[in-house]
Image (cartoon, rainbow, N blue to C red):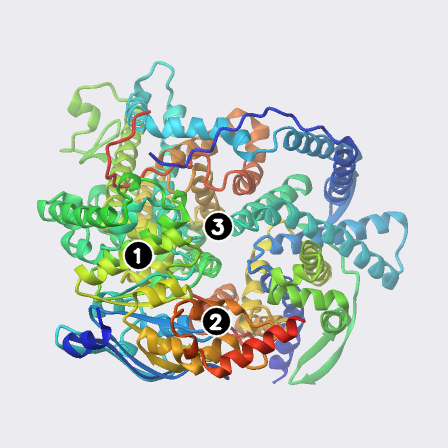
């Protein structure tokens, strides 16, 4: 039995509410909000034309900001005063998460079943399947980064570099050397993993924050090189005419040149552009599931446990004879490999890649997914990825505010639930029988 | 057991430290310290705070590179020079395991997992660097089983079998200390280095610790090196005591010898000490109710001066 | 030779700007041991506020340049400091006891938030600014290449020197500076001795933000165009400067800033403009791999 559950404390006596300090605190907060909002929200610059700027005032927004912060702060403090024990406030979410983590197997099966059935549901459309594909790409990237950040505890801010390397490797192999997707895939992974080792080797002994900045630097270097080394990478125009995926050799086209059977001809179906879309969806689904299976398995192997031990306490690991550098490198390389695989998929899906898709914002987004989902939690990554990709679908406002919300959410999660939304860690080995309930 | 005869008859030197010196810039933390630790013996390193005890440990276990000195570990008939081995390799190659002053368990992992991580190196080999493990080959599975058995053995020894699946952070303090010792033992060491294992333990727990260490000494063929302030542990179970003060060794002998050594008493009590802690002196004195004369006249004079200042 | 001199002048100017931002990084790192990833966005906010302040003053009819500069300087420093203060209160203070990656992740989140915040409310397009401080003089004229030192460049370098001097005095001689240095050494002990650690930390952030605000103003004047993304690149470069100079060391930050400015200027002057950012990143990696304590920093001994 883990003793991680909090003690249940009955709130027999509600403490009195001291209004004066609460109000004073909230007023100060509101005032600060007004000061913050005044220059940037209250005074909006806009193009007047001819290289000049004009100013629009939005003092009503400033007032709203002030009032909003006032109310929010008051409400929060009130909550704190009435329910002073942190455990009871978090209790609902914690017990939900704990229940959820015990139901992992049924949830997983249901999830996979749903995902597999998605393209064939009556409400599905090409748009929805596309959305699902995008979600799955981010899920795979999230699971890959999870190995590095969640399991090994190495903050990698340049993960997008491996994504890019995989994509460009595939693109060049496919376009110039005629490799098929499945033939090029292992090479993309290999090249990406090699980059992971080359980039990781000099820097993995750096401490957390330095490592983060250096990996960020690497990510940017890769992007700048891709942008400028036009002869190899096409520069800002990127690489286009990447061969689209085929069904193991059968092209998804309406008609094919002499001697080549198309997919729909082979299976005796009416041609539909949806065939390729659905196929791509299943490819990424399979890739993601393989990533997941691999990660779950490797967590139970010595190397996986070493990753987690290293995250917990590197000094203790050294005292136990564990080589921190090789352990970190392996996490880095494996994470990079999955990033590379995802990159290949991305390239073949789009048919076209350019350095624009591989900015730091992408790295930050993938990191946000891992952090919000709960570092180390597979299910959490899925939920966070779904949230990220589908948020803009709920309205134009959400689309605009998406990264804003994500940034705020990252801060919020760290402050309130640092272990993420799903923070229950399942041990890799049990001595006793599995606890029931 | 009379440690003097034991030392003469069956002394197997395990670790020979010669002229160990550790400098941090201008500060000399350890100054020309030499001693030998023997197998089947418990060697204690004591001394006032700041004497350099943990620094010695850090030099032995690869966390610091000694400024000068020769650290010779005798293993399987060959001599390993610790100062030449890279930090983390010392645990595996020289067979030295340690615990830390502030417990360093893997807090987010269970007790069992902590003990399994300690067996990382043999398990990695058996898993074929994960390949055999991924494929679920029997050679890995049996290695993992053996590792779990070994962990279970130590969990039984420290009485934590029923809480093996608890998160290490949720264990009570005394249990955490014992778990850390068990974790060090799971690496199969030749020399076990314990840094203040009794810190924060109450007298009952200290007595249990003594029992555990004595049983380890009796049953495993290893040496134990320990840093301690708790005199009941030091005097109760050590075969051999080394005293450090300001980085230098000031005494080296059996507990009885060290206890009576005037240098040691002075180190703990200090010279013109107004607020010198009477506790160590008391502990030292209480160990020897039959030999009040052994407390030197120096000590008595100091004691009276102390009382004088009390007004 | 003339070309070299021009690059030198450009590099010194750029370096001053980086140095001012770097001081913020190094002070925060020195006192709470974390990289304020959002500091670059504070600088960007400073730049935006300075443009807005200029516009407002222009609309209000104040066009006398020195006065306008002074007023804008004060306004920018004021509002940006509040942002700096707020970021610390919201994103870092609650995390003081948390695991080591938490403040860094929070900082990244804050950085993303601030970037998008400015992007949403001020628009994603670049903001141009007509040149306010114009003119300069020719330092050297050789072989048809005139080395020009503009008044603006002079202003930037001199203001930076003045601020550096003022700051060093502040840290070395005032009670606040002493309290800050005490907190850097041993926070718990400082608090036991009656230092209000929370306030000292807040003030550190405020001071860093104020300097970043000045840098933002300078960049607005110097380049004449800003956008919501300038914080990212400048932030990383300034952090590189702080590390190069020795993290935790104030003169080190300034020295590092100057060096990075010079490296960037000379690289783009003599090699290639496209890869000038790469040159700075390369410096970052090289310094951290080979000499993490930087030029003026103190080596850290691991406590086990």
User: Which residue corresponds to mark 2?
Assistant: B281
SS at mark 1? helix
SS at mark 2? helix
Q: Residue at x 15, y 45 (%)?
A: B145
The C terminus of chain C lies in which quarter of the figure?
bottom left
Q: Chain of mark 2?
A: B
Q: CA distance from mark 1 to mark 3?
A: 25 Å
Which is more foreground, mark 2 or mark 3? 2
> Where does residue A115 sit, x and y in percent of width and height?
32, 25
In the picture, measured across the screen, residue B11 lies left or right of residue A170, that is left
Is residue A176 in view from this perspective? no
User: Which residue corresponds to mark 3?
Assistant: C99
In the picture, measured across the screen, residue A204 lies left or right of residue A210, that is left
Which is more foreground, mark 1 or mark 3? 1
The N terminus of chain C lies in which quarter of the figure?
bottom right
> Where does residue B127 sit, x and y in percent of width and height?
16, 51
Dot placed on the residue nearer the N-terminal end, 1 or 2:
1
Which is more foreground, mark 1 or mark 2? 2
Q: Are marks 2 and 3 on the same chain?
A: no
Task: Using a 10 Å C-alpha cutoff, classify the residue at mark 2 as few (fewer than 14 neighbours), some (14 to 19) or many (20 or more).
Answer: some
Q: Chain of mark 3?
A: C
> Where does residue B60 sit, x and y in percent of width and height?
32, 73
Q: CA distance from mark 1 to mark 2?
A: 29 Å
Give A57 or A378, whichever is nearer the viewer.
Answer: A378
In the picture, measured across the screen, residue A158 lies left or right of residue A65, that is left
User: Which residue corresponds to mark 1?
Assistant: B181
């Amino acid at each position: 039995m883990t003793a991680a559950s909090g003690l249940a404390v009955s709130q027999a006596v509600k403490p009195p509410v001291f209004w004066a300090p609460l109000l004073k605190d909230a007023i100060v907060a509101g005032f600060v909000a007004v000061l913050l909002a005044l220059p940037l929200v209250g005074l909006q610059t806009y193009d007047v034309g001819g290289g000049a700027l004009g100013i629009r005032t939005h003092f009503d927004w400033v007032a709203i900001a002030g009032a909003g912060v006032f109310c929010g702060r008051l409400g929060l403090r009130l909550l704190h005063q009435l329910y002073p024990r942190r455990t009871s406030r978090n209790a609902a979410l914690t017990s939900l998460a704990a229940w959820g983590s015990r139901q992992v197997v049924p949830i997983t099966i249901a999830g996979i079943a749903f995902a597999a059935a998605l393209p064939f549901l009556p409400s599905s459309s090409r748009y929805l399947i596309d959305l699902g594909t995008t979600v799955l790409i981010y899920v795979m990237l999230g699971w890959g980064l999870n190995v590095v950040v969640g399991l090994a505890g190495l903050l990698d801010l340049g993960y997008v570099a491996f994504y890019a390397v995989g994509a460009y490797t595939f693109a060049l192999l496919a376009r110039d050397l005629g490799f098929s997707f499945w033939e090029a895939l292992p090479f993309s992974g290999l090249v990406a993993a090699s980059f992971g080792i080359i980039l990781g080797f000099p820097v993995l002994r750096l401490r957390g924050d330095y490592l983060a900045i250096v990996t960020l630097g690497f990510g940017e270097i890769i992007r700048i090189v891709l942008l400028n080394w036009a002869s190899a990478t096409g520069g800002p125009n990127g690489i286009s005419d990447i061969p689209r995926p085929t069904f193991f050799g059968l092209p998804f086209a309406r008609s094919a040149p002499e001697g080549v059977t198309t997919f729909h001809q082979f299976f005796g179906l009416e041609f539909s552009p949806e065939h390729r879309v659905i196929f791509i969806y299943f490819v990424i689904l399979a890739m993601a599931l393989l990533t997941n299976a691999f990660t779950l398995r490797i967590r139970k192997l010595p190397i996986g446990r070493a990753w987690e031990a290293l995250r917990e306490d590197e000094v203790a690991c050294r005292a136990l004879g564990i080589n921190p550098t090789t352990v970190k490198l392996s996490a880095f390389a494996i994470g990079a490999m999955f990033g590379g695989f995802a990159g290949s998929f991305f390239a073949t899906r789009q048919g076209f890649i350019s350095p624009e898709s591989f900015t730091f914002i992408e790295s930050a987004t993938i990191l946000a997914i891992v952090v919000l989902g709960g570092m180390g939690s597979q299910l959490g990554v899925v939920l966070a990825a779904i949230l990220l990709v589908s948020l803009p679908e709920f309205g134009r406002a959400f689309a605009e505010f998406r990264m804003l919300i994500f940034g705020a959410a990252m801060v919020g999660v760290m402050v309130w639930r640092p272990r993420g939304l799903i923070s229950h860690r399942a041990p890799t080995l049990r001595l006793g029988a599995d606890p029931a309930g | 057991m009379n440690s003097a005869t034991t030392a003469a008859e069956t002394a197997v030197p395990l670790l020979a430290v010669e002229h160990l010196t550790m400098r941090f810039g201008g500060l000399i933390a350890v100054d020309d310290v030499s001693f030998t630790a023997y197998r089947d013996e418990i060697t204690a390193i004591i001394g006032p705070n700041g004497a350099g005890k943990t620094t010695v440990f850090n030099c032995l276990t690869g966390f610091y590179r000694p400024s000068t000195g020769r650290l010779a570990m005798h293993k399987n008939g060959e001599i390993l020079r610790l100062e030449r081995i890279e930090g983390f390799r010392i645990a595996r190659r020289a067979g030295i395991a340690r615990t830390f002053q502030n417990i360093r368990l893997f807090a987010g992992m269970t007790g069992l997992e902590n003990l399994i991580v300690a067996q990382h190196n043999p398990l990695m080999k058996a898993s074929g660097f994960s390949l055999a493990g991924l494929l679920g080959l029997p050679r890995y599975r049996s290695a993992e089983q053996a590792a779990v058995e070994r962990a279970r053995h130590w969990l039984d020894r420290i009485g934590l079998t029923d809480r093996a699946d608890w998160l290490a952070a949720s264990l009570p303090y005394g249990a955490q200390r014992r778990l850390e010792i068990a974790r060090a033992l799971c690496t199969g060491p030749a020399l076990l280095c314990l840094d203040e294992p009794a810190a924060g333990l109450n007298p009952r727990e200290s007595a249990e610790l003594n029992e555990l260490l004595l049983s380890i000494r009796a049953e495993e063929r290893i040496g134990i090196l320990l840093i301690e302030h708790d005199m009941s542990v030091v005097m109760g179970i050590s075969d051999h005591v080394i005293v450090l003060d300001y980085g230098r060794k000031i005494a080296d002998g059996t507990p009885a010898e060290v206890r009576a050594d005037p240098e040691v008493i002075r180190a703990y009590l200090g010279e013109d000490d107004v607020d010198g802690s009477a506790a160590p002196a008391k502990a030292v004195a209480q160990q020897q109710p039959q030999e009040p004369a052994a407390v030197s006249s120096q000590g008595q004079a100091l004691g009276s001066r102390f009382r004088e200042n009390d007004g | 030779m003339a070309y070299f001199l021009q690059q030198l002048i450009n590099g010194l100017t750029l370096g001053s700007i980086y140095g001012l931002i770097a001081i913020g990084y190094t002070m925060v790192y020195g006192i709470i041991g974390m990289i304020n990833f959002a500091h670059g966005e504070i600088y960007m906010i400073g730049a935006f506020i300075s443009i807005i302040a200029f516009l407002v003053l222009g609309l209000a009819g104040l066009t006398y340049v020195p006065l306008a500069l002074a007023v804008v300087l004060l306004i920018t420093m004021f509002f940006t400091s509040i942002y700096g203060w707020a970021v610390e209160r919201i994103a870092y203070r609650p995390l003081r006891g948390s695991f080591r990656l938490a403040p860094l992740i929070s900082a990244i989140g804050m950085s993303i938030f601030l970037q998008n915040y400015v992007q949403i409310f001020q628009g994603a397009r670049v903001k141009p600014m007509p040149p306010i401080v114009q003119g300069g003089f020719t330092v050297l004229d050789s072989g048809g290449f005139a080395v020009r030192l503009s008044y603006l460049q002079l202003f930037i370098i001199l203001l930076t020197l003045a601020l550096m001097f003022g700051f060093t005095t502040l840290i070395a001689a005032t009670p606040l500076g002493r309290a800050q240095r005490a907190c850097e050494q041993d926070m718990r002990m400082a608090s036991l001795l009656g230092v209000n650690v929370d306030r000292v930390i807040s003030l550190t952030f405020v001071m860093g933000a104020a300097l970043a605000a000045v840098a933002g103003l300078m960049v607005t004047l110097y380049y004449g165009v800003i956008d919501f993304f300038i914080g990212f690149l400048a932030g990383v470069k300034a952090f590189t400067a702080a590390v190069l100079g020795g993290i935790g060391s104030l003169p080190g930050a300034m020295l590092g800033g100057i060096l990075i400015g010079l490296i960037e200027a000379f690289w783009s002057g003599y090699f290639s403009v496209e890869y000038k950012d790469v040159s700075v990143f390369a410096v970052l990696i090289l310094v951290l791999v080979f000499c993490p304590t930087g030029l003026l920093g103190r080596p850290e001994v691991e406590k086990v």
